[in-house]
Image (cartoon, rainbow, N blue to C red):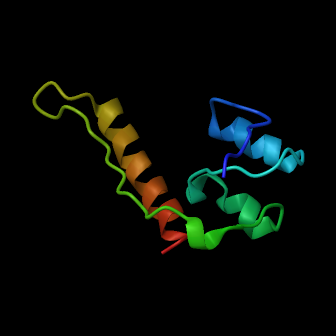
Amino acid sequence: MDVSTRLSVTSFNAAIRAVQDHWGLTQVPSYQINEHLLAGRLKCVLEPFEISPEPVHIVYVEGRRASAKVRSFVDFCVEVLRRDLHFNA
């Protein structure tokens, strides 16, 4: 079955906002909508058709010339991703 698109966006935030404004359904990573799911503003539908989870990687160059700012940012990302991705575990 062909499905026609009513709206096409280029960011998760725009897709989430469109769904909240009753434009229809969207497919976004679950960690992008954790707060909306917990608050009851959005709900998952078509769960049997969800795609399998995929790993998330943070890649950067480490070595003698590594920036402390980069390392700090990477540590922050790892902490936030672990917390947010654990939401669905």
Residue at the image point whose x is 44% and y is 64% from the top:
52
Task: Please give left or right for residue 89 compared with residue 28 in the image.
Answer: left
**Residue 77 relative to residue 68: left or right:** right
In this rendering, position of residue 86 left or right of residue 37: left
- 48 lies left or right of 74: right
Give the answer, above or below, for where 58 lies relative to 67.
Answer: below
Which quarter of the picture shows residue 62? Answer: top left
Nearer to us in this view, 9 or 82: 9
As drawn, which residue projects farthest toward the right?
21
* Residue drawn at x 53%, y 71% as measured from the top left: 88
Question: Residue 78: image x %, image y %?
Answer: 38, 52
Total labels drawn = 0
Q: Is residue 27 above or below residue 37?
A: above
Observer-nearest of 78 and 37: 37
Hey, which residue is sitting farthest front in the picture? Answer: 1
| Residue positioned 74% across, 40% down in the render | 4
25 is higher (above) or lower (below) than 11? below
- Residue 56 in the image, given as x and y percentages of width and height: 36, 52
Q: As rendered, which of 34 and 76 lies closer to the eye?
A: 34
User: Whole-percent x and y of residue 58?
Assistant: 32, 44
Q: Residue at x 55, y 70 (%)?
A: 87
Between 41 and 10, the one lying in front of the other is 10
> Residue 73's spot in the image, x, y percent?
39, 38
